[in-house]
Image (spheres, rainbow, N blue to C red):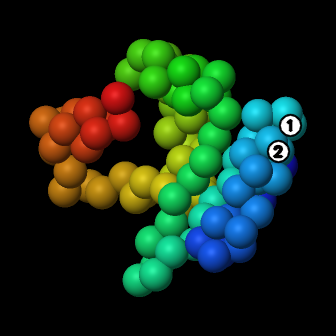
Amino acid sequence: MTLATTQSDFRNHMKHYLDMVNDSSEVVYIARSKQRAAAVIDQNKLDWLEWQKPGSLEYAVAEDKLKEYGIIPDSDPELIDEDYDKYWEQFK
């Protein structure tokens, strides 16, 4: 399950949200100003995402989920492979 909250609510109830992330593997999205957002995820999920190999089924599934949630942009036909690789490097 995914949770969404505001920055001020997250700040006021940080322990509660962090416990949900750790105990229930919840993902918490925190809305910030100027249509930005942050996500808090469990360390195990982060490790899993970071170790997926490009071209693997797991990598493709993770990429599709990130696109579905609007965390990364959908494929851009103008995006060349070099730019694509640079984009993904920021998540390592």
Q: CA distance from mark 1 to mark 2?
A: 5 Å
Count of labels shown? Answer: 2
Q: In the rendering, at what x and y percent does residue 47 appear? A: 54, 21
Label 2 residue SS: helix
Residue 83 visible here:
yes
Q: In the rendering, at what x and y percent does residue 44 appear? A: 65, 22
Q: What residue did someone put label 2 on? A: 20
Asked if 81 appears above or below 79 in the picture, the reply is above
Q: Is 46 placed left or right of 23 in the picture?
A: left
Q: Quadrant of the C terminus?
A: top left
Query: Depth check: 21 or 35 in front?
Result: 21
Query: Depth check: 72 or 50 in front?
Result: 50
Label 1 residue SS: helix
Q: Amino acid at mark 2?
A: Met
CB contact under 8 Å: marks 1 and 2: yes
Tell me what residue is drawn at x 47 percent, y 16 percent: 51
The numbered dot on residue 24 is 1
Q: Residue 57: which quarter of the image?
A: top right
Tell me what residue is drawn at x 43 percent, y 54 percent: 72
Asked if 43 appears above or below 5 in the picture, the reply is above
Residue 2 visible here:
no
Q: Amino acid at mark 1?
A: Ser
